[in-house]
Amino acid sequence: MTITITQDMLSPSPLLGVSSMDFFFYLLVAYGIAFGMQHKAPFLRGKSAWLDRMLVCTYCTGFHAGWITWFGWKLKMIFENPMNVTGITFIEMILFAMGSSAFSYFFDTAIRLMETHADPIEVEEEIEETEAEEAEEEDG
């Protein structure tokens, strides 16, 4: 059995106009927005009960970060080529937001898992121990 790979299969042209690297990049952007909204934007807290409940849930915040990212992504595409606005659909935005919510939840959970198994860094104690050992060597 022979498998033939044509040049079309090897070409770097992305499927549906989006490369997998671009897609992954925008998922990371969405996660960054979600993380920033949850942990680095204290001015969002206490505005409304709905917003406070959303900011506790990574999946929920990831959804909203996803449509924000999608909107910015499409604006970038429009500014790059104002004559090509085809393919910008509401369903695409919802699908990207859903993918972003799942990615944000997965990535955040993976990072939390890694953090629980990481050894804490105790720099101050190490410095004090080193200074104490040096003082004992000078005295001894």
Image: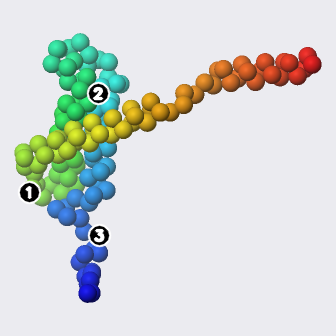
Q: How many marks?
A: 3
Label 3 secondary element: loop
Q: Is residue 75 visible?
A: no
Please tell me which of labels 1 and 2 falls first in the chain.
Answer: 2
Horizontal relation, residue 41 to residue 118: left or right:
left
Which three-letter amino acid code belongs to the residue tagged 1?
Thr
Q: CA distance from mark 1 to mark 2?
A: 31 Å
Quarter of the figure with residue 11: bottom left
| Residue projecting furthest to the front | 1
The answer to which of 120 and 101 lies nearer the viewer is: 120
Residue under the image location 22 percent in, 33 percent down: 59
Quarter of the figure with residue 139: top right
Label 2 secondary element: helix
Please rate how many residues cluster around mark 1, counting C-alpha atoms within 10 Å: few if below 14, some from 14 to 19, many from 20: few
Please tell me which of labels 3 and 1 falls first in the chain.
Answer: 3
- In the picture of the structure, the residue carrying the numbered disc 2 is 37
Please tell me which of labels 2 and 3 falls first in the chain.
Answer: 3
Quarter the N terminus occupies: bottom left
Residue under the image location 58 percent in, 28 percent down: 121
Which three-letter amino acid code belongs to the residue tagged 3?
Pro
- In the picture of the structure, the residue carrying the numbered disc 1 is 86
Please rate how many residues cluster around mark 3, counting C-alpha atoms within 10 Å: few if below 14, some from 14 to 19, many from 20: few
| Residue projecting furthest to the bottom | 1
- In the picture of the structure, the residue carrying the numbered disc 3 is 12
Which three-letter amino acid code belongs to the residue tagged 2?
Met
Is 115 situated above or below 56? below
Residue 108 rendering spot, x and y as whole percentages: 33, 35
